[in-house]
Image: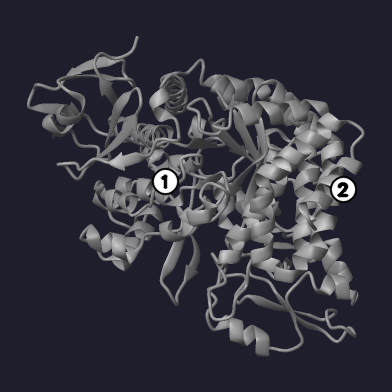
Amino acid sequence: MRTSELAAQVRGAFDDDRDAETFLLRLERYGEDLWESLRAVYGDQVGALQGRLLEVMLHAYHARPAELRRLDEARLLRPDWLQRPEMVGYVAYTDRFAGTLKGVEERLDYLEGLGVKYLHLMPLLRPREGENDGGYAVQDYRAVRPDLGTMDDLSALARALRGRGISLVLDLVLNHVAREHAWAQRARAGDPKYRAYFHLFPDRRGPDAFEATLPEIFPDFAPGNFSWDEDLGEQGEGGWVWTTFNSYQWDLNWANPDVFLEFVDIILYLANRGVEVFRLDAIAFIWKRLGTDCQNQPEVHHLTRALRAAARIVAPAVAFKAEAIVAPADLIHYLGTRAHHGKVSDMAYHNSLMVQLWSSLASRNTRLFEEALRAFPPKPTSTTWGLYVRCHDDIGWAISDEDAARAGLNGAAHRHFLSDFYSGQFPGSFARGLVFQYNPATGDRRISGTAASLAGLEAALETGDAGRIEDAVRRLLLLHTVILGFGGVPLLYMGDELALLNDYAFEDVPEHAPDNRWVHRPRMNWALAERVQQEPSSPAGRVSAGLRHLLRVRRATPHLHASIESEVLPSPDPRALLLRRDHPLGVMVQVYNFSEQTVMLPSHVLRDVLGERAGDRLSGSALSLDRPTVRLEGYRALWLTAGEAPA
């Protein structure tokens, strides 16, 4: 369709010329990203897709509520809204946090008191009944899980959050749908249109060819990547369907432009309900190519760029967060490189940072941390990282052999050590974690557990040893200080602000018992949340007060804007990690002691960057750097800027 024809179609869809001009200006701005990426994926099929796509976008634009249109304009004027130091995230399961969506609305004072500006409610769109991979097997993208509320409740919550300056974040599962989803049901019934939405095979020849290079995601309870379905064949004779994660999660065929169109419609529908950030779940897996591991394919980034462009035209307040737990060289493409620079996702998880936090805590050595950070290419300055200590998922030891070798380690041996340490099997370990998904073929053992239990608080409380309790509290605060200072959106996982311990009661719930990740998905302890104010010296009280202090300091520190990268400053002591941030207001140096031992850090390392006097923003104290050393107590952190500490 020619540009003049597009303009005519757009103008014909509006009664108000001003709205038409707004839409056309955005189409002019983002249209190149949209059409170029669609042509790269779908080739000649784009001509037939273009008119249908424009119709979906125009319908959503007309349906967009006035208050969300105002938010669109505000975000266009402040495109760095996700990068600002006051941006702090909170991640929770609706039912485990407050029972229902209405219950969440009743707890907004608590979130606002923490300084939260971004609320990620874990999967709440209607999943299949029974086992559903924690909600990631979606049966209906336009309905809420019935026990949590309704879509109107979701819209009301989004409005209430928006009134407090908090953005609603939801999961959007792109790789697969539940076997019970209407598309899958129609495919099973033999409808050729919907059979083309999935990867279906009449026999094992196709699956076996792909399996030769595919990894297994859940080798314990979902081995292989394909499942037999008795009702799937064109004549009901059965067939194989691609199921990367579980047999009830059917992978979608994104090579079909109809699937792309469906998801544009879904994204814009949810955006008009008030969703501001979409967590693009399992985004790495959506494109399949024989002879590869079917992850991180170039088409993934074209499709994400096109989805983002469509959202920018209709709802520019919306942002994308890539859930891509992949190697650094692959991860950077989810934020955009070369022609895609800054045009793919607005945010991505920094999984490597999380892994290195726990690695350094166990080893009391930051050399591997330094090497891992140096391996990261610079991200686009318009994007940001999602930074976290813990999340709903297990910890996989994503440590490359190359990084390990540069740090003088054997990668396999170090990964084995970390699994032993955090499952409590290593002599002297302070951690209480559970092994998740042991793979005997690779030796891979992932770890489940809450931050507090992995950091040693559970074991310390059992002994009643005040020194061990003190160390555990300091570890928890150190980990959170790093994610608050690195530059990105720190994501607080529900209950970590109260140092909640492992919840072993998950074993008593039949649908949770096979999956020990539920050990770190406890219910919110509201009695404790109220009690910490009266018990500031308790472990939970100290973690809560310490974290709130860190959040206040972060909000007042412009050096933490996420457009600035944190860079490794060589440390003369392996126990201490040094990071440098070059902000227009001046250099910031962050110092983190990852051991319980006192470190005497040579002052010249800091003096060469900051001069002879520096202020620590965390303590509000001044440091004289003309002395030979700076004393760092166990698990101490410093955020240093030149001159005196701010008042």
Find residue 602 and report its horizontal and vertical position in percent: 11, 33
Q: Please identify the quadrant where the N terminus is shown.
A: bottom right
Residue at 67 percent across and 77 percent down: it is 226
Type of colouring: one colour
Q: How many marks?
A: 2
- Asked if residue 536 shows in the view, the reply is yes
Find residue 317 and report its horizontal and vertical position in percent: 68, 35
| CA separation in Å, label 2 and label 1 | 58 Å
| Three-letter code for the amino acid on which mark 1 is drawn | Leu
Classify mark 2: helix, strand or loop: helix
Q: Please identify the quadrant where the C terminus is shown.
A: top left
* The disc label shown at residue 352, or none: none
Which label lies toward us, 2 or 1?
2
* The disc label shown at residue 454, or none: 1
Most extreme residue toward the front, as rendered? 4
Residue at 63 percent across and 55 percent down: it is 304
Q: Check the image and report above or below for 159 versus 305.
A: above
Residues 309 and 635: in front is 309
Residue 214's quadrant in the figure? bottom right
Sequence order check, earlier mark of 2 and 1: 2
Residues 86 and 319: in front is 319
| Three-letter code for the amino acid on which mark 2 is drawn | Gln
Most extreme residue toward the top, as rendered? 647
Classify mark 1: helix, strand or loop: helix
Q: Which residue is mark 2?
A: 9
